[in-house]
Amino acid sequence: MKILIDKRMNYIFYKKEEDYFLEIICGTIAIYEKKICLNSEQVQEYNKLGESYIDQLVNVLRQSK
């Protein structure tokens, strides 16, 4: 596993073998974690836009239930 971005108490973005994973800290009163494996379209966007895309994706995922 290679950590690509670590924003403590916000999210961790890492690569494990050929897959990219995003672990997001969510919640206000109760804290919980969402973990996703990026699909090929999301990986392409990350490769084009870098960290700013991951920040946007985190915000979208945090707002989805």
Image (cartoon, rainbow, N blue to C red):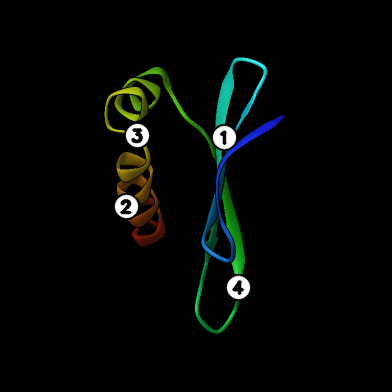
In percent of width and height, residue 57 lies at 35, 45
**Residue 37 drawn above or below residue 56:** above
Answer with left or right where residue 16 lies relative to residue 6.
right
User: Label 2 amino acid?
Assistant: Val
In percent of width and height, residue 35 lies at 58, 45
Q: Residue at x 32, y 52 (%)?
A: 60
**Residue 43 drawn above or below residue 4:** above
Nearer-N-terminus badge (1/3): 1
Quarter of the image where the C terminus is located: bottom left
User: Label 3 amino acid?
Assistant: Gly
Q: Which mark is residue 31?
A: 4
Q: Are marks 2 and 1 in contact (CB under 8 Å)?
A: no
Q: Quadrant of residue 30?
A: bottom right
Q: Residue at x 51, y 62 (%)?
A: 10
Answer with left or right where residue 42 lies relative to residue 32.
left
Q: Are marks 2 and 3 in contact (CB under 8 Å)?
A: no
User: Label 4 amino acid?
Assistant: Ile
Q: Which residue is mark 2?
A: 60
Q: Which residue is mark 3?
A: 50
Q: Are marks 1 and 3 in contact (CB under 8 Å)?
A: no
Q: Marks 2/3: CA distance?
A: 16 Å
Nearer-N-terminus badge (2/3): 3
Q: Marks 1/3: CA distance?
A: 14 Å
